[in-house]
Amino acid sequence: MSKTSAGQKKNQGDRFKGYRLGVGLGLRRENSEDLVKYKPSEIDCLEAAPENYFGTGGKLYREFLELAEVYPIVFHGISTSVGSLKPLNRNYLKEVRAFVKDFSPAWFSDHLCYSSVMGAQFHDLLPLPFTEEAINHVVPRIQQIQDVLDLPFAIENISCYVHPGEPEMKEWEFVREVVERADCGLLLDVNNLYVNSVNFGFDVEEYLQHMPMERIMHIHVAGHRVMDDFLLDTHGENIIDPVWKILERVASLTSLPAVIVERDNNLPPLPDQLAEVRMARQIIENANAAGVSAVGGAK
Ligand SMILES: [Fe+2]
């Protein structure tokens, strides 16, 4: 149904880097109509949360279908609750699986967190403790998701403001151990990385040097708000230079199958969203010119 297809998997032997989706934008209720109207050529792909369309019809779903005919769609969930103590929600995964069958996305992703307690779903992404116990809990659940969906899965680093309990390791160790042991992909949100590095006082370069670059399938670039004494991750502001710099650094280190400008709140007019997509593309093209085969679909 969509333009996304097995044809985009260029190298069967390279599970995580064999895809080339390019540079795109998060599909939101607020930009859906304009995207359908203008179908901007700046965009190679769109990222959508499948749960936004479960059991829906109407205008929003029709727009989604029309966009899926034009752009490859990469699915990014918010309800898997990988870290929850409850069993994975089979009904949710079943619905995602139906979408996977219909739209053939290259992979599915969600956050390294929990977002439900006692079966009640929240819209917040709640942090896991950086402990061996949490790794041992999360890893088989990620493997289960990949098995159920029969699709590569990428886990995203989240921003947070407190550690639940005493961390046994650094953030990069926790994230790396999860993706390595689960044998999954990494969705690196460079804004979340920047926000945490400032709020918790760690070194971005140290984080990147220890991260398995070959597992990065997907990048999020986003904005945050500067408060008096901390950074608030809103995904609702313009992307600032230090975050672009991290994208630039990552693009210099590895190829990037997909780069998504992720704006969740306070969406500006579409031309302003597209300006950030163009900025991301310029950074990737510069990395390409410097010798890193960074991202496919570049225009
Ligand atoms: Fe993100």
Image: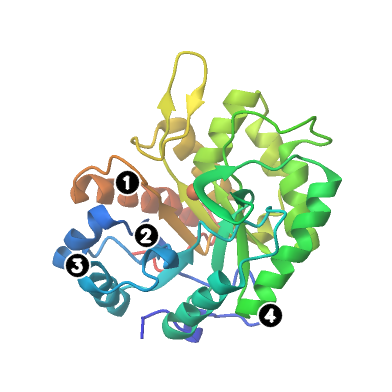
Which is nearer the eye, 235 or 145?
145
Instruction: Name the image quarter holding the C terminus.
Output: bottom left
Residue to which mark 4 is pinned: 13
Residue 140 placement, left or right of 203: right
| Mark 4 neighbour density, 10 Å: few (under 14) some (14–19) many (20 or more) | few
Which is nearer the eye, 264 or 55?
55
Query: The disc labelled 3 sits on which kind of residue?
Result: Val
Residue to which mark 2 is pinned: 24
| Mark 2 neighbour density, 10 Å: few (under 14) some (14–19) many (20 or more) | many
Residue to which mark 3 is pinned: 36
Q: Residue at x 64, y 28 (%)?
A: 162
**Closer to the eye: label 4 or 3:** 3
Vertical arrangement, residue 26 with respect to residue 3, above or below: above
Q: Residue at x 48, y 82 (%)?
A: 98
Q: Residue at x 51, y 48 (%)?
A: 122
Proximity of marks 2 and 3: CB atoms separated by less than 8 Å: no
Which secondary structure lies at badge 4? loop
> In the rendered picture of this protein, how many numbered marks are placed on residues?
4
